[in-house]
Amino acid sequence: MSNNQEPNTETLAETENFMAWRADEPDGETTYYLQLGRATINFFMEEWGELLSTVPELMQAKPDDDGMYAVSFDNVDVWMDNEDWTEFLQLLRELEK
């Protein structure tokens, strides 16, 4: 009998600076992670589904007057310049495949 308490992980999408992956925890819970540079945001399955459902809306987002894009994740706001936003959208497109 295995006593492994490490989650099984799978990379879902990856760009040069960003990554999305899934962790199947030993307790049966699945957690999703979105690493945006140095920040990592975790999502439970329902929250991940909500994120994926907003992809079409995010693809249409416009920058603010300072040229910055913002995305909010349950009490976390992430601001990105055009270069990072373009890479973020690339990651989202990979997740849609």
Image (cartoon, rainbow, N blue to C red):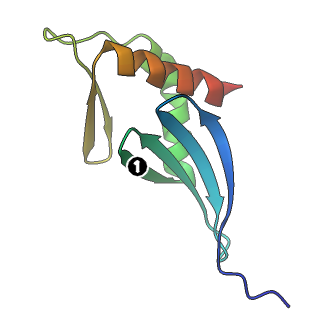
Q: Is residue 51 left or right of residue 10?
A: left
Which residue corresponds to the image point at 55% horizontal and 26% vertical from the top-left?
Answer: 92
Q: Is residue 3 left or right of residue 13?
A: right
x then y, percent, for residue 46: 54, 50
x then y, percent, for residue 96: 65, 26
Which residue corresponds to the image point at 54% horizontal and 30% vertical from the top-left?
Answer: 53
Identify the image quadrant of the C terminus: top right
- Name the kind of residue labelled 1 in the image: Thr
Residue 35 vertical position relative to residue 9 in the rendered view, above or below: above
Q: Is residue 90 left or right of residue 57?
A: right
SS state under label 1: strand
Q: Which residue is label 1 attached to?
A: 40
Residue 43 vertical position relative to residue 79 in the rendered view, above or below: below
- Front residue of 48 and 17: 17
Residue 3 vertical position relative to residue 45 in the rendered view, above or below: below
Which residue corresponds to the image point at 14% horizontal and 11% vertical from the top-left?
Answer: 66
Quadrant assignment, res 57? top left
